[in-house]
Image (cartoon, rainbow, N blue to C red):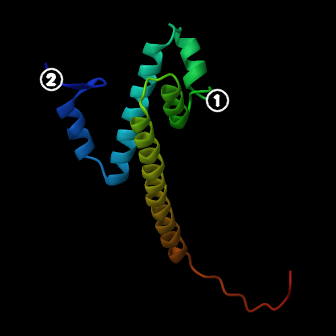
Amino acid sequence: MPEMIGAFTKDEMLAIVAGQAEAGNALVVAGLVEDSLEKLLLAAGRELSNTEAERVFAGMGPLASFSAKIEIAYLFDLLDKAVRDDLRACYRDRAFECVTLIMGKVDRFMYVKALKEVPVVSMDETEE
């Protein structure tokens, strides 16, 4: 039986990750880790209805953030310290890299749009 990562085989997951840009890879991997943490917390805890799980893990729920899932999984001894520290570092570093890459693209789009605009020069010396 092939090794599974969530709903995908390891080979399928590697193919998905290989097809992404660097920022896309970080987001795909972070999504997989976060999804796995949520499943771990649900499996280790009491049975919840879909509505109850949504209140906990979505929107403004107490475990809606990736970092909250990491900390709670560690608190309840579902992760050891080394894994928790690796996830913290990975999340923080990759998130910063992704934001930097995305903001770089935003800046480039803004510069291109600004360069396309025709400058307006006014010879009118009246103050507004």
User: Quadrant location of residue 52?
Assistant: top right
Q: How far across and down, in percent of the image, does residue 35 sit? A: 41, 28
Q: Are marks 1 and 2 in contact (CB under 8 Å)?
A: no
Q: CA distance from mark 1 to mark 2?
A: 37 Å
Quarter of the rendering occupied by the N terminus: top left
Mark 2 is on which residue type?
A: Pro
Residue tagged by mark 2? 2
In this view, the residue in front, 2 or 79, is 79
Name the element at disc 2.
loop
In this view, the residue in front, 49 or 89, is 89
Q: How far across and down, in percent of the image, does residue 103 sit? A: 50, 60
Question: Along the polypeptide, which appears first: circle 1 or circle 2?
Answer: 2
For image coordinates 45% across by 14% down, the residue present is: 44
Q: Residues within 10 Å of mark 2 (few under 14, many from 20)?
A: few
Mark 1 is on which residue type?
A: Met
Q: Is residue 108 above or below residue 121?
A: above
Q: How far across and down, in percent of the image, does residue 12 sit? A: 20, 33
User: Quadrant location of residue 7?
Assistant: top left
In this view, the residue in front, 73 or 109, is 73
Q: Is residue 54 left or right of residue 89?
A: right
Name the element at disc 1.
loop
Q: Is residue 34 left or right of residue 51?
A: left
Residue tagged by mark 1? 60
Q: How far across and down, in percent of the image, does residue 13 sit? A: 24, 35
Q: Is residue 43 above or below residue 69?
A: above
Q: Total label count? A: 2
